[in-house]
Amino acid sequence: MSSHHQDKATFLERLIFNNRPVVILLCLLASIFLFFQATQVRPSTSFEKMIPLSHPYIKKMIEFRNDLANLGNTVRISVEAKEGTIFTQEYMETLRQIHDEAFYIPGVDRSGMKSLWSPSVRWTEVTEEGFDGGEVIPQTYDGSAESLNELRNNVLKSGQIGRLVANNFRSSIIDVPLQESYSDPNDQSRQIKLDYQKFSHELEEKIRDKYEAQNPNVEIHIVGFAKKVGDLIDGLVMVVAFFAIAFLITLVLLYWFTWCIRSTIAVLITTLIAVGWQLGLMHLVGFGLDPYSMLVPFLIFAIGISHGVQKINGIAQQSSDADDALTAARRTFRQLFLPGMIAILADAVGFITLLIIDIGVIRELAIGASIGVAVIVFTNLILLPVAISYIGISKKAVARSKKDAVSDHPFWRLLSNFAHPAVAPVSVVLALLVAVGGFWYQKEHLQVGDLDQGAPELRPDSRYNQDNDFVIRNYSTSSDVLVVMVKTAPEGCSHYDTLSAMDELMWKMENTEGVQSAVSMVSVARQGIKGMNEGSLKWETLSRNQDVLNNSISRAEGLYNSDCSVAPVMVFLNDHKAQTLKRVVAAVEAFAEENNREGLEFLLAAGNAGIEAATNEVIAKSELIILILVYLCVAGMCLITFRSLAATVCIVLPLILTSILGNALMAFLGIGVKVATLPVIALGVGIGVDYGIYIYSRLESFLRAGLPLQEAYYETLKSTGKAVLFTGLCLAIGVATWMFSAIKFQADMGLMLTFMFIVNMFGALWLLPALARFLIKPEKLAGKVGGSLLAH
């Protein structure tokens, strides 16, 4: 580096280091305020934040929400009799108590609750005198043997077997629809937002724990979006434990790297300040912590450590020939502020691109992470050098840095061969082969969406997934429901043409792979017409007589809206795997294209499977756009910074290779591209570019000094290679702890980020110098000072 580069102080440097007490005071005041705000952050999520609100499917679902009872955010409580059947006085009394308990839990849409104890659950039969019917549990029920026998007969005639009652009569379900917000019991004018964690805890305490203890013959299974999210939030409380583990690992590794307890503590404290500021600012902008944004403080800690290590490494090197700690800190600030700033901007770009995904939790993650990297500019790029200018670096660390500067390093000498004329072509060809192979594998095997039954965010052996498996095995109507909305003119849903088309759709769905069954008002109409004809099976069809049709659907309560203009067709699926949803949605869309006409439309989609299908479409469309935007923005910043297309290619190509290999690894491990894993792609690129920027900025300075490429790379490795290697390993070890999480999507993210941190680090050390051998002309850089912004 030239003396000009070392001695000319910028305005920003003078502003900061000439006013160090003011900088520390301002940071202290900001920390007091923002740490207080951070203590106010609470777990927070909602049903609508988890879904793509602008997708056509979701728009239709919201438009007809009031016409689709119990098809949105619903919890299902299955009460199982461990011995015997449900037709015992003890079981029915427990079921009644659970129904009443759930009825009074805040957030429950009480008008839509259904169980055997609901008056709206009725039975019908054909008698000599015509139709007869009534409540499944009659007003005269008293728990006697006669009443229980009557109840059994009523259940058999109700059509609820496989729906509210298990196929083996050993359990029954309570359907509990939820409201996103509800009136405050103490102030009806105030709306309270549903707290999923609190609601989940109430289900556990007031229902599962209470009634399983009260009746040892009963086992309770609970499934539904709210329960899943509650379990996720509970599991993610372990993030605090993982954060503590990562902190301790980083403390040990940092001390091993620096040999200076003062600088180690300084890096850790300034990075923790960044995390505190980020959480405080999130609260100020109105965000809480949801299952996805809970991971952001981890990432901010990792990025802060990455930049802190570079600063400490630089200060240790400068201290060897500086008069005091202040001079060393100022020189390091001058040398590394701009590369660090560019790297942080690249991090922010990776996060900001996630904003194009119209899913609330991802957008909040993007904003929260962008805020976090912005505060790192103040904590790790400004406050850390100022703090070190006061406390200095230990003599042991300075002596070690001096020794490293003059010693020959066999390991770095070996790695410098990556820039050798004979090795570089081999590296480039090998990288090309790996990229082609990885791209082919991901193209063939990578899928968008879930690849497992149940809740893939949770472990297969989690209580929730065990409960979900129980429901799938014992009921004909699974928890995965795709709802097709049939829209007609008012009073049009009962016309023969409409019902005939719905019947045809149901037949097509039931003959589509992955579908369990399909239910609509047609199901009731066919049964009604059969009943009006003495129960003869040959009359189980749709009549062309409108009066007969009107009479037959009068008992299809809940299967059409008040003016008979919307009728749902409920398609119950075996699972919500990506291929199942793709196949079923394609079948419905093909049917709709053939049958939609004026006055009759088949619209997708409601139900949890419909929401999942919409989410998968948004993710599929966004994935490539995000990657392109990330790389365009990162490349643009590198181009502006280094004013060199060759330098930009050297930095960006290793990142592209990592992205390809990351997707191939996801395909190999059976991890789909979904809400939980898509952010990893942008995060990996944004954080990974730090390595390339720091390495190239040092490499360029040595090339300008006139060194040949391989020697310049050796000097680069001696000065910053150790920091890059340490950072990659430190970050990887920190997020690797996630792999032990009870939350599967966190474990998946931990695995993917560990892989991307290591491969990005290795790519920068291995592929960047090989590419530089072909793209960079050292003779054009030699002796130049002003070729890039980093030289100023």
Image (cartoon, helix red, strand yellow):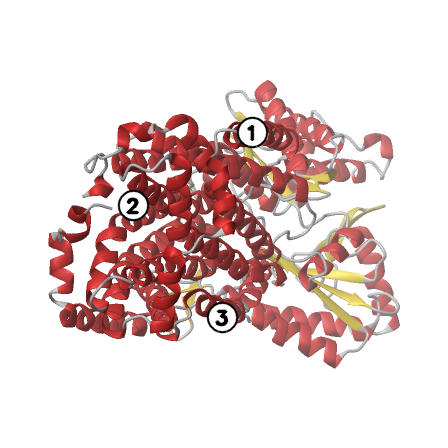
Q: Classify 10 Å Cα crowding around label 3: few (below 14), some (14-19), many (20 and above).
A: few
Q: In this view, does 387 lie to the left or right of 248?
A: left
Location of residue 567 in the rendering, given as x and y in whole percent from the top left corner: 58, 37
Q: Classify 10 Å Cα crowding around label 1: few (below 14), some (14-19), many (20 and above).
A: few
Cβ atoms under marks 2 and 1 closer than 8 Å: no
Q: Which element is circle 3 on?
A: helix
2 vs 3, front mark:
3
Q: Viewer-proximal residue, 778 or 732?
A: 778
What residue is disc 1 on?
A: 426
Quadrant the C terminus occupies: top left
Q: In which quarter of the image is residue 449?
A: top right
| CA distance for labels 2 and 3 | 29 Å
Most distant residue in the bottom direction: 214
Q: Which element is circle 1 on?
A: helix
Earlier sequence position, callout 2 versus callout 3:
3
Q: What residue type is labelled 3?
A: Val
Residue at the image position 19 percent from the left and 63 percent from the top: 327
1 vs 3, front mark:
1
Earlier sequence position, callout 1 versus callout 3:
3
| CA distance for labels 2 and 1 | 31 Å
Location of residue 297 in the rendering, given as x and y in whole percent from the top left corner: 42, 62
Earlier sequence position, callout 2 versus callout 1:
2
Most distant residue in the front direction: 407
What residue is disc 2 on?
A: 342
Rendered view: 276 above or below 525: below
Q: Is residue 630 left or right of residue 534?
A: left
Rendered view: 375 above or below 721: below
What residue is disc 3 on?
A: 252
Location of residue 640 in the rendering, given as x and y in whole percent from the top left corner: 25, 35
Q: Which amino acid does label 1 sit on?
A: Val
